Image (tube, rainbow, N blue to C red):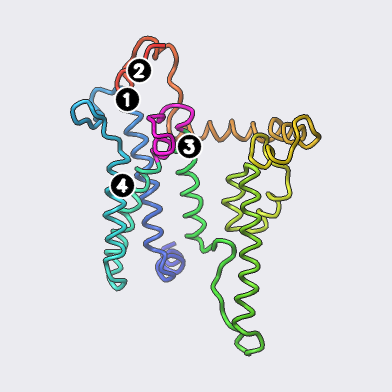
Amino acid sequence: MIELFTHRIVETGRLPLFSFLVAFIVMFVLTRMNVRLIRADVRWWFKNVKVGEMHIHHVVFGVVLMLVGGVAGFAVPDLYGGFNVVAAVVFGMGSALVLDEFALILHLDDVYWTEKGRASVDAVFVAIAVTGLLLIGVRPLGFEGIQPDPDGDTSRAVLVGVYAFSLGGNLVLAVITLLKGKIWTGLLGLFVPIILIIGAIRIARPGSPWARWRYEPGSRKARSAQWHEERFRRPLIRVKIWVQEFIAGRHDLDLRHRRKGVTDPRGGRSKVE
């Protein structure tokens, strides 16, 4: 195992990326444990960080850590590998804190425990998936660098042209896939281009920009998109939500607690509806 780690991670120069991923996952898990204990109002646990009446969200600390880790990563010479690993760890910790409140940044509102707050967990899952693919050596859009033909029969200009054409085609497929509302397919397709072909050909999700532009209400394609959504997509979404809430905690506070005016540990006293 140690030899495999040395060969696949250390010798390939991926140790900082590996350190970033480990720090990211550990910090995300610890952060979610912390906020769930705060939400449960456990007496012996920490409370929210406040300055007067202002609640300091952990995204603030994440931005600071990302700045420190990012600047350190650029400033430290490459020959100091140990310091680069430390910088990657700090950057990973900060990234986890920031993406854990991605929904807050997106909506400019404290939606942490609402349905909109699930966007933060989606962002974290995407970051872990993309980093994991990079770590095992998968390159976006199949990029492996441009190498001239050793026999000299194929010029570098031809190779660059072929790669540029391939890259442009994959980007077009990625845009179509994303416009069809298939976010995960589009992102994973950047690393496995064959997925982009499938995503671009398959029918769009209802409500996606592609469906709004090209599917007339009541048309065969619109009905087919709705059928696929109910038959296949929604069961997968329910499984995804279950996994999210198992890891990150249940979203949408119980209405009974909100009506009782129970203190919301992330935003003061809940409003009574």
Q: x and y percent of residue 20 in the render?
A: 37, 55
Q: Is residue 193 above or below residue 183?
A: below
User: In the rendering, which numbered label is found on residue 184?
Assistant: none
Q: CA distance from mark 3 to mark 2?
A: 22 Å
Q: Are marks 3 and 2 in contact (CB under 8 Å)?
A: no
Q: Residue furthest right?
A: 220
User: In the rendering, which numbered label is found on residue 119?
Assistant: 3
Label 2, residues with CA under 10 Å away: few <14, some 14-19, many ≥20: some
Q: x and y percent of residue 216 in the render?
A: 76, 35
Residue located 37% across and 35% down the image: 32
Residue located 64% across and 80% down the image: 158
Q: Which residues are magenta?
A: 100-117
Left or right of 246? Residue 185 is right
> Reading the chain from its start, which is encountered first: label 4 or label 1?
4
Q: CA distance from mark 4 to mark 3?
A: 18 Å
Decide which of 259, 39 is in the foreground and name it.
259
User: In the rendering, which numbered label is found on residue 63?
Assistant: 4
> Reading the chain from its start, which is encountered first: label 2 or label 4?
4
Q: x and y percent of residue 63 in the render?
A: 31, 47
Q: Are marks 1 and 2 in contact (CB under 8 Å)?
A: yes
Label 4, residues with CA under 10 Å away: few <14, some 14-19, many ≥20: some
